[in-house]
């Protein structure tokens, strides 16, 4: 069993002020694989002090020096690529093929996008007689989740380093192994002491301390909407900038056409990517009422290719959900779908055949779902797909927008123009049109802004829009 009870503060691995050991569980085996420590507000104080001190120097680095630093981070990351992938599979159950195919390489996309933006960004320009300056916002607090444990850190870190900000990072206590390796990578790349600080802990203690801390200028949170509300409340007293990427319940509108032979199976695959533990998962498949039967047959046929099991096996398509609490939540929602009268197409309650331990959920699809059912409204965060019939396009758009969330939307049609017309009507921050894989991995553009409408959050991550989040604007009038 690995021991990772130290925190990384001011360029050193240090003992927690008041250590509270925490076991890291492999969700595929339910065995303890490592031990970390949950931090305290006092540990956050130390990390913030280090970040504030480092900001005085790091914020003045030239663009050339920051580009060079990011390039060194990429170089070191590529050397540890396999270690990162294996850690992600161990800590949160992502199949190794997915850990290597998207979870781990996503960081390289974020860092390269940050470099591209940094090289072309105008930090100073004239507006009439006024000089406009874009300056780094200061010390940032990052609170990140377990479902994409490295991606969600580096989506923030790339822009922050490029801008000249320093940071205090609290990864999820359920997936702390890959962040430790990332910290080692940053140190090996020459990130100066105090620029990046890692404090493990839970949300109510370390997360709250970060959100409330007067020495932190911006908090960026990725997680559930309920937790995001708490972060916003905690941050309000210090009027710091709050950036949030929260929950989702994305609709996937399939217009009638030949494309459905491909878009139905892939829509299900997309919804079940990462065992459904992705905030943009297209968990609501909206199809013409007259074609529900055909869609169900396509679903049944495509699901035969699923392999649920040991995430270390290259043949596995779906691993477990992250922990027992998440497993129980998904099971309750599957039961609610059955109780409310939805028709079970595949899957159902309990573990899949052959999985006697581990937090494995049967990939589950419901048909005859109505928009008011819990499974159609709540973010399940598991491999559960709902098929909802619509009368016409207006009805489909109405169903898609009838949600507290607005993170993403999907539209497929034989004619891309028809898909675009519908996509423009969906109230969401990112729209995927005819979203079919080019190489068996989901489409992702690393310079495109990522973020949501409504209760899916505020602000944007990655690329130019994400980079701008880490700046203040100063007007110099002469």
Image (cartoon, grey):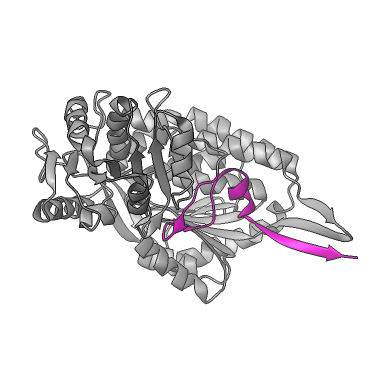
Q: Given the current orientation, which residue lies at the most extreme bottom position? A: 237
Task: Point out the image quarter for the C terminus.
Answer: bottom right
Is there any visible trace of residue 26 in the rendered image?
Answer: no
Question: Residue 129's x, y, as percent?
Answer: 89, 60
Q: Could you tell me if residue 314 is visible in this image? A: yes
Q: In which quarter of the image is residue 317?
A: top left
- Measured as percent of width and height from the top left, residue 301 is found at 18, 26
x and y, in percent, of residue 19 in the image: 36, 62
Task: Between residue 100 and residue 298, name the one nearer to us.
Answer: 298
Q: Is residue 356 left or right of residue 445?
A: left
Q: Residue at x 34, y 57 (%)?
A: 402
Query: Which residue occupies the foreground of this view, 154 or 345?
Result: 345
**Along the viewing direction, whichever of 66 and 299 lies nearer the viewer:** 299
* Residue plotted at (54% across, 56% down): 459
Residue at image location 36% in from the left, 67% down from the top: 204
Position of the N terminus by quadrant: top left
182 sits left or right of 10 in the view? left
For residue 158, side relative to residue 419 (left or right): right
* Side of 170 relative to 256 (left or right): right
Q: Nearer the viewer, residue 166 or 300?
A: 300
Determine the residue positioned at 55% across, 47% down. Answer: 157
Q: What stretch is highlighted in magenta?
A: 449-478
**Considering only vertical position in the picture, is 177 above or below 16?**
above
Looking at the rendered structure, the number of numbered marks drawn on it comes to 0
- Asked if residue 476 is among those painted magenta in the image, a careful observer would answer yes
Give the x, y percent position of residue 242: 53, 63
98 is within the stretch colored magenta: no
Q: Is residue 335 above or below residue 184?
A: below
């Amino acid at each position: 069993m690995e021991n990772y009870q130290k925190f990384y503060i001011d360029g050193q691995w240090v003992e927690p002020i008041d250590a509270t050991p925490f076991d890291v569980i492999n969700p595929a085996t339910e065995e303890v694989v490592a031990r970390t420590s949950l931090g305290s507000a006092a540990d956050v104080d130390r990390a913030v002090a280090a970040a504030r001190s480092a900001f005085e120097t790091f914020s003045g680095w030239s663009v050339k020096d920051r580009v060079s630093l990011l390039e060194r981070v990429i170089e070191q990351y590529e050397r540890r690529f396999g270690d990162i992938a294996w850690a992600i599979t161990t800590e949160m159950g992502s199949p190794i093929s997915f850990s290597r195919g998207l979870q781990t390489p996503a960081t390289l996309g974020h860092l390269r996008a940050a470099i591209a933006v940094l090289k072309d960004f105008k930090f100073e320009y004239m507006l009439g007689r006024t000089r406009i300056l874009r300056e780094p916002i200061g010390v940032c607090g990052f609170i990140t989740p377990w479902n994409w444990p490295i991606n969600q850190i580096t989506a923030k870190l790339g822009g922050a380093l490029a801008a000249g900000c320093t940071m205090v990072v609290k990864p999820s206590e359920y997936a702390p192994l890959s962040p430790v390796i990332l910290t080692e990578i940053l140190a090996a790349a020459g990130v100066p002491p105090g620029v990046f600080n890692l404090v493990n802990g839970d949300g109510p203690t370390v997360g709250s301390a970060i959100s409330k801390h007067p020495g932190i200028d911006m908090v960026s949170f990725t997680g559930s909407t309920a937790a995001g509300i708490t972060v916003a409340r905690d941050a309000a007293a210090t009027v710091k900038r709050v950036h949030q990427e929260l929950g989702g319940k994305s609709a996937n509108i399939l217009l009638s056409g030949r494309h459905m032979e491909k878009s139905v199976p892939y829509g299900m695959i997309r919804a079940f990517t990462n065992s459904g533990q992705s905030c943009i998962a297209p968990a609501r498949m909206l199809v013409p009422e007259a074609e529900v039967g055909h869609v169900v047959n396509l679903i049944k046929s495509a699901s035969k290719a699923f392999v649920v099991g040991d995430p270390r096996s290259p043949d596995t398509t779906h691993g477990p959900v992250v922990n027992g609490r998440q497993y129980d939540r998904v099971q309750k929602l599957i039961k609610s779908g059955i109780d409310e009268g939805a028709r079970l197409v595949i899957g159902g309650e309990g573990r899949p055949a052959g999985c006697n331990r581990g937090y494995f959920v049967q990939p589950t699809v419901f048909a005859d779902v109505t928009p008011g059912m819990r499974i159609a409204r709540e973010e399940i965060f598991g491999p559960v797909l709902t098929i909802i019939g619509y009368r016409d396009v207006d009805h489909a758009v109405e169903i898609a927008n009838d949600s507290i969330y607005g993170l993403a939307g999907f539209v497929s049609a034989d004619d891309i123009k028809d898909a675009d017309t519908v996509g423009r009507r969906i109230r969401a921050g990112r729209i995927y049109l005819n979203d079919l894989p080019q190489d068996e991995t989901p489409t992702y553009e690393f310079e495109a802004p990522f973020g949501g409408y409504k209760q899916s959050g505020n602000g944007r991550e990655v690329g130019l829009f994400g980079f701008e989040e880490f700046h203040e604007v100063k007007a110099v009038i002469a």
